[in-house]
Each structure stands twice: as C-alpha cells, then as structure tokens.
Image (tube, rainbow, N blue to C red):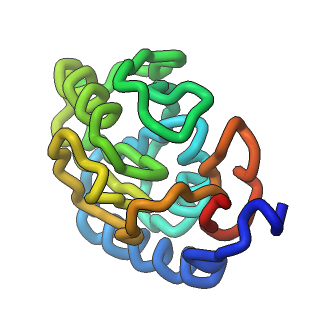
Amino acid sequence: MKQDVPKVLISEEEIAARIAQLGEQISRDYQGKNLLLISVLKGSVVFMADLMRAITIPMQIDFMSVSSYGSGVKTSGVVKIIKDLDQPIAGYDLLIVEDILDSGLTLSYLSEILQSRGPKSMKLVTLLDKPERRQIEVETHYVGFTIADEFVVGYGLDFNEKYRNLPYVGVLQ
C-alpha cells in the first residue's frame, strides 16, 4: 500500500490531536442539548468512532449512507440514499459527521433532506475540507483540516473501497 500512497498528508498523531480539540468544542457547544451525531457512511465511520469518544456529553448516533461517487475519482453529481436513518430526527440537535467536503453536492442534498424532517438544529463537522473543489456552498461549523485539491485516502477515505484502513490521510499516487 505504501507504494500507492507515498505521501502522508496528515499523520495519525495530528488527526488524534485535532479530534480531541473538536470533541472538546462540540461538548461545550452542545452542553444541555439533545445531540444526535449522524455518520455519513462509509467514509466517516473511522472519524465518527474517534470523535464520539472525544465528546464528553450525552448523545446518540445514527448512520446514513448516500452516494455521489462511482468508481472514479470525480463526483458524478448524482446523489442517492443507500441507507436511511433508523430513527426520526425531529427535535434533535443534529451534527452531520462527514469525512470530506469537496464539491458540496452530496452534503447540500443531504442537508435539504434532513432539514425537511424537523430537527431542532443542524450543523456539520467534517474531517477534511477541500474548498477548491466546491460547486455548491455548504456551511461548515467544525473542520478538522483544510486541504488542497489532491485525491486523498486513509482514515476511512477510499479509492474503490481500498485504503480505508490506513491510520493517516495520504495522497493517492
């Protein structure tokens, strides 16, 4: 795998330190609220697992799977729900947990769907933000790292379902 991902962009230690900071900030911001983390599968599952352990207040979690990618490295622009939430979200303070925000197409679509279901509030936390690729503006509330327009894998991010298990974020050759 190392030959396919020769450049480590964000180390395991940098990720852990940043997630600890995000967990503290989210815990403060959502104190006394009805927090529901929604992981956008599959890419955000590693981030979600670490982030929820860094949050020190009561919360719930749920999972949703949407797709806007085929097997290539560019977004298709077509978004479909593959797995919907298991519970109603009305009255919850939602925090959408995403691995990477690039074009904004997927998150814009997902935000509209979730907002129509009546949550009390809704914000976004993303591990990686790639603003150069934005086609639709999406408001981010918590960002782990802002990165350049490179195709990255690891820490949950994949290429054709491979490389998710890398403990760091690297640039795919």
Closer to us: 78 or 115:
78
Question: How many numbered circles does the render carry?
Answer: 0
For residue 167, what is the image quadrant? Answer: bottom right
Q: Is residue 81 above or below residue 99?
A: above
With 3 as the anchor, is 83 left or right in this view?
left
On screen, residue 25 versus residue 18, left or right, reads left
- Image coordinates of residue 91 in percent, x first then y, are 22, 31
Q: Position of residue 117 (x, y in %)?
A: 23, 19
* Residue 130 x/y as whole percent: 35, 59
User: Measuring 60% from the left and 65% from the top, which residue is drawn there?
Assistant: 171
Whether 24 is drawn above or below 92: the answer is below
The outermost residue toward the front is 173
Q: Quadrant of the N terminus?
A: bottom right
Q: In this view, does 94 lie above or below 68?
A: below
Which one is in front, 108 or 115?
Answer: 108
Relative to the observer, which residue lies in front, 19 or 73? Answer: 73
Residue drawn 53% across the image and 40% down it: 73
Is residue 121 at all visible to an observer of this figure?
Answer: yes
For residue 9, which quarter of the picture?
A: bottom right
Residue 65 at x, y percent in the picture: 51, 26
127 displayed left or right of 90: right
The quadrant of the picture occupied by the C terminus is: bottom right
Q: Residue at x 35, y 60 (%)?
A: 129
